[in-house]
């Protein structure tokens, strides 16, 4: 097979910080994956290519596009289990399982994310304080590796590779299909309660308290356009509305829109301040209780893609941090100090609670999760370099899934199990056949 038979395409990370010319091929049969995997020295699997960091491509790599691998392999209603191919999106999965009042609760915030990508990044969603990350719903995985062949992975079979694969950034091979343990969902309608907060400290205190409830999903929206209003905002709590009649929704599973991305960014100091003011007024002057459907609760950015497009061709930077609760006030003090110095352009600042155990490369722990979106400019980058130092100082775990510019030094200091991951991966694959721009830059 010659390279001329492959499509050459320029791929971008979702945050627009990285791009690369890659060879890309879209198989639809298992034997094609075998043939393609044996053709190229360096390969990586690609789903929807919605990763903020460049995890699904590398310069001159072969990217195996799995969009056609979106079939249901097996469904066992009695055992509440489903086996699906890795290219299936969350929208496609939920459109099927919700008809049977079943789901997996660890849902990332956009319906077109693929299940294989979610496994490779150990994705989480709004329910991470209750349900943890997606690994809690995975029973087994079928993997193809160009040197080690076809492997069934589970807690009982090939357990070490099973653990490496969940949150392993696609570096153990191509995830072909996944068997999920499903859970019952009794209602697809929710009541959303809103409460005002006036500071970062008050917000975290209330979120920590509210997260102790087992049947609700808690997150915040906080202002960050200036130091005086830093942290004031709203806490949202989604609670199942058992009093209303459930109406079955068709969850979007396939991209149908062509979005226009302006060349120049629309987000700037003035537009951020105006958008924050309007959002705050609308949510504080309306009823504190709001009825919402499943789609609005779990996929808040669907239909609002313009938020990301408004960053323009330069894109944006997202930072997601897991902060120890006993060090969060020290972090806030330093955060405010550096904020006054650098005045970063922040479009989104949000908190939620997370539970889990940090192992290998997984972004998971019993800590407070802080998400920040920045306009991609010099002030934001300088401020984020200070955040990197705070991560090292306060034992904060930065997400390498969301932040594509994390320095290698910070990554190595914050991920205490990095060498364990690398040693195990090297024993499994001495030639390190699978790689991406992100893994190459961080030397994983």
Image: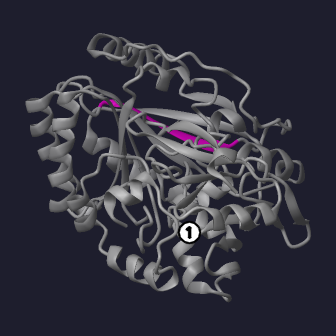
User: Which quarter of the rendering shows the N terminus?
Assistant: bottom right
* Residue that lies at the very extreme toward the bottom in this rendered image: 156
In the rendered view, does 359 fall on the left or right side of 154? Answer: left
* Residue at screen point 86% across, 73% down: 79
Q: Quadrant of residue 183?
A: bottom right
Q: How many marks?
A: 1
Residue 198 in view? yes
User: Which quarter of the rendering shows the C terminus?
Assistant: bottom left
Front in this rendered view, residue 6 or 78: 6
Q: Name the residue that disc number 1 marks.
A: 166
In this rendering, is residue 164 above or below 313? below
Crowding at label 1, few (<14), some or many (≥20) Cα neighbours within 10 Å? many
Residue 332 in view? no
In the rendered view, does 238 fall on the left or right side of 190? Answer: left
Q: Position of residue 319 (x, y in %)?
A: 34, 44
The span picked out in magenta is: 232-240
In this rendering, is residue 236 above or below 354? above
* Residue at screen point 63% across, 73% down: 145
In this rendering, is residue 222 above or below 365? above
Q: Position of residue 149 (x, y in %)?
A: 69, 79
């Amino acid at each position: 097979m010659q390279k001329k038979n492959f499509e050459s395409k320029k791929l971008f990370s979702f945050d627009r910080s990285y791009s690369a010319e890659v060879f890309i091929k879209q198989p639809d049969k298992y034997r094609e994956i075998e043939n393609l995997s044996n053709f190229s020295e360096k390969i990586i699997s690609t789903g929807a290519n919605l990763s903020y960091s460049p995890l699904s491509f590398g310069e001159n790599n072969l990217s195996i596009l799995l969009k056609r691998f979106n079939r249901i392999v097996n469904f066992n209603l009695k055992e509440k289990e489903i086996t699906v191919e890795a290219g299936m999106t969350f929208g496609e999965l939920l459109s099927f399982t919700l008809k049977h009042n079943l789901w997996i609760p660890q849902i990332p915030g956009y319906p077109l994310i693929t299940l294989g990508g979610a496994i490779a990044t150990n994705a989480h969603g709004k329910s991470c304080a209750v349900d943890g990350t997606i690994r809690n719903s995975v029973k087994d995985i079928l993997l193809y590796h160009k040197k080690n062949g076809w492997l069934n992975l589970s807690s009982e079979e090939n357990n070490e590779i099973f653990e490496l694969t969940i949150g392993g950034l696609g570096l153990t091979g191509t995830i072909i299909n996944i068997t999920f343990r499903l859970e019952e969902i009794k209602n697809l309608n929710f009541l959303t309660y809103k409460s005002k907060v006036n500071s970062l400290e008050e917000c975290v205190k209330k979120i920590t308290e509210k997260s102790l409830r087992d049947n609700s999903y808690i997150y915040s929206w906080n202002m960050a356009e200036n130091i005086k209003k830093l942290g004031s905002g709203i806490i949202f709590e989604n609670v199942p509305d058992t009093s209303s009649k459930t109406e079955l929704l068709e969850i979007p599973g396939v991209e149908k829109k062509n979005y226009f991305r302006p060349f120049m960014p629309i987000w700037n100091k003035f537009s951020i301040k105006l958008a924050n003011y309007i959002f705050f007024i609308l949510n504080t002057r309306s009823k504190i209780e709001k009825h919402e459907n499943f789609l609005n609760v779990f996929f808040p950015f669907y239909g609002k893609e313009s938020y990301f497009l408004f960053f323009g061709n330069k894109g944006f930077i997202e930072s997601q941090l897991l902060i120890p609760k006993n060090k969060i006030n020290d972090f806030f003090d330093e955060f405010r100090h550096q904020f006054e110095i650098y005045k970063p352009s922040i479009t989104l600042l949000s908190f939620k609670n997370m539970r889990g155990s940090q192992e290998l490369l997984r972004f998971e722990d019993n800590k407070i999760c802080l998400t920040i979106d920045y306009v991609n400019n010099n002030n934001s980058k300088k401020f984020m370099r200070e955040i990197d130092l705070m991560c090292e100082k306060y034992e904060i775990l930065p997400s390498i899934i969301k932040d594509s510019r994390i320095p290698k030094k910070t990554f190595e200091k914050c991920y205490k199990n990095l060498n364990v991951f690398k040693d195990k991966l090297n024993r499994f694959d001495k030639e390190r056949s699978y790689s991406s721009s992100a893994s190459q830059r961080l030397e994983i």
